[in-house]
Image (cartoon, grey):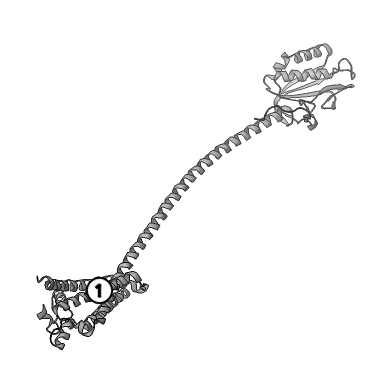
Amino acid sequence: MASRTDTGPVAPRADLLQYLSDTALDADYARVTAARGAPVTSTARRRGIGPALGALLAFGMLVALAAVQTRSGASEAERESEALRAQIDDGRADFAALTGLSNVLQQQVADLQGTAETASQNDADLLADLGRFRTLTGAAAVSGPGVRVVADDAERTKPGGEGAVLDTDLQVLVNGLWQAGAEAIAINGNRISPLSAIRGAGFAITVNYRSLSPPYAVQAVGDSATLEARFVDTPGGQAWLDLETNFGLRFDMDTVESLSLPAAPAARLRVLYAERQGELP
Amino acid sequence: MIPVLGLVAGVVAGLLLQPTVPVPLQPYLPIAVVAALDAVFGALRAYLDGIFDDKVFVISFVSNVVIAALIVYLGDQLGVGGQLSTGVIVVLGIRIFSNVAAIRRHVFHA
């Protein structure tokens, strides 16, 4: 090796690796030594060790710095990946929590929908009840099939005479119609409500405090197929048969396919003292 | 003995002081270390060959470090920094192995 280094500049070689290993030692060492003459084993001692020591010092620092830097870089990368892992864990936890919340909310939505359906069903029931009760109490005008009765005094009868229609006769008639299955009744356009009275005032008959004059047209909504036949069998029917035959009162009953009855006056539907017991459904 | 003390003192100083390397220079520190390693092993071999010269050592040390860093810097600017680093490391590595082989022959006479 020494023999090669002390020959001047090295000629280029085709073999790069060989060239690299041949010129591994700087040729300058050999050249400087040759220029100085005999090899000196310790030039450092002769010239003072300052520069070489400084270079070695710098080398040591370089090595230490590179090592420190690489290690800190590695720990930094580790910290970062740690932070990212923590973020991933946090995200997963958030996701799980939100999924749970979503399930809970979906359950609540389903419950509320069920409640809403029940409520609207209740509303529908209440409306149906309300309509039925308004019909039954006479608060609402109604229409439907039924019978029309025309009752009149006997011919040539003075008011208050023997052949006149009395308030009790009309009461019996209305009672008989209820019994026969009527659902709504009006006399001369005066709807019978639960508070309506049929009574005589002098020679006149009043219904809902309105005086009526003969002939009395009584309209009853009900099953038009059975109402007439069933009325005849009631005590009211029998009573009117007697009135017809014995006193000559006129009585006509016709089946009508469509009747229209007005509502009772509001005064006849007022409730002042009766209090309802129990809850509404 | 004294050179070894200098080396140890350098390492200790680097570890204790930990001077901050400017961020733009940080990528070139490893390649500078390899280049310096080459210079140091070359110097050791020259010493054992009996042809050591401290001036040559200092110059080769500084120029090795600076040129290695410059080459890699140039490679970074051209977008081939990684490949050039590899090339420099390969060349310097071969030189280091050759020098260490010569040192081994001197020390163990084998």
For disc 1, the marked residue is B5
Q: Position of residue A210 (x, y in %)?
A: 84, 28
- Quarter location, residue A67: bottom left
Using the image as rendered, state which of residue A34 and residue A102 is in the foreground: A34
Q: How many marks?
A: 1
Q: Position of residue A60 (x, y in %)?
A: 27, 73
Q: Is residue A276 above or below residue B19?
A: above
Image quarter (top left, top right, bottom left or bottom right) of the C terminus of chain A: top right
Q: Is residue A117 above or below residue A23?
A: above
- Image check: A194 left or right of A57? right
Q: Position of residue B95 (x, y in %)?
A: 18, 74
Using the image as rendered, state which of residue A112 and residue A18 is in the foreground: A18
User: Which residue is located at x 75 percent, y 20 percent?
Assistant: A253
The crowding category of the residue bearing disc 1, from other C-alpha atoms within 10 Å (few below 14, some 14 to 19, many at least 20), is few
Residue B84 seen in this snapshot: no
- Image check: A168 left or right of A226? right
Q: Chain of mark 1?
A: B
- Quarter location, residue A222: top right
Image quarter (top left, top right, bottom left or bottom right) of the N terminus of chain A: bottom left
- Image check: A211 left or right of B59? right
Using the image as rendered, state which of residue A190 and residue A150 is in the foreground: A190
- Secondary structure under badge 1? helix
User: Which residue is located at x 81 percent, y 17 percent?
Assistant: A169
Q: Position of residue A122 (x, y in %)?
A: 61, 33
User: Which residue is located at x 38 percent, y 57 percent?
Assistant: A82
Amino acid at dot 1: Leu
- Quarter location, residue B52: bottom left
Residue B13 seen in this snapshot: yes
Q: Is residue B89 above or below residue A276?
A: below
- Image check: A107 left or right of A20? right
Q: Is residue A81 above or below residue B63?
A: above
